[in-house]
Image (cartoon, grey):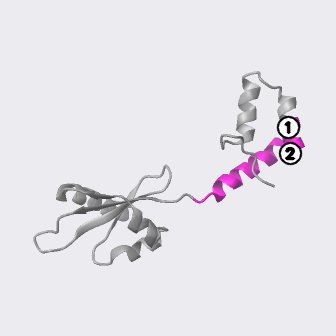
Amino acid sequence: MSAPLDAFGRWAVRSNLDRVARGEVTASECVATLRANGYASVSDAVRDAVEAVEAVEVAPTVVYIGAANDANGNPRRGWIVGYGSAAPFFVDEGYSGVSQLAAFGVSRRQADDCPRIAVTPAEYRAWNNLARRAVEVAS
């Protein structure tokens, strides 16, 4: 059974309950609509909606940033990766290149097609330090 989504992609259950709250439909009409769509109860419709939302794969947002190499010639480049509303994280390119992004669900094509932004060395260090602190907190 497909998830009960309305025309705007919201859960139809939520939308219908909002309509009940506004007095546009009665609770009985709301339940009747859900039953007409094959649901035995409101909780069955909510469960299907939650499962449908959890099953949606969110494509990552990827931005490539790069600063000039440091005094020793080491690269200062990497990717800022974000998934939906989760906090973005930084993946340092180092000498490994784009291949390490696969571990984060980013395809080669996404990495090649992402926007590229030139940043100052200080901005690069800020992102790289943020990534290091996140790893330290996680371990």
Residue type at numbered disc 1:
Thr
137 left or right, relative to 28 = left
Identify the residue under disc 1: 33
Q: How crowded is mark 1: few (under 14 residues within 10 Å), some or many (20 or more)?
A: some
33 left or right, relative to 79 = right
7 left or right, relative to 74 = right
| Placement of the C terminus among the 4 image quadrants | bottom left
Is 9 or 121 nearer to us in this picture?
Answer: 9
Is 62 or 34 nearer to us in this picture?
Answer: 62
**Local SS, label 1:** helix
| Placement of the N terminus among the 4 image quadrants | bottom right
Q: Where is residue 104 in the image (x, y as percent from the top left)?
A: 46, 68
Q: Can residue 49 be seen in this view?
A: yes
Q: Quadrant of residue 126?
A: bottom left
Residue at left 85%, top 43%? 41
Residue type at numbered disc 2:
Asn
Residue at left 64%, top 56%? 54
Is 68 or 89 nearer to us in this picture?
Answer: 68
Cβ–Cβ below 8 Å for labels 2 and 1?
yes
Q: Is residue 78 magenta?
A: no
Q: Is residue 56 magenta?
A: yes
Residue at left 40%, top 75%? 100
Identify the residue under disc 2: 37
Residue stretch rendered in magenta on the structure: 32-57
**Local SS, label 2:** loop
Which numbered circle lies on residue 132? none
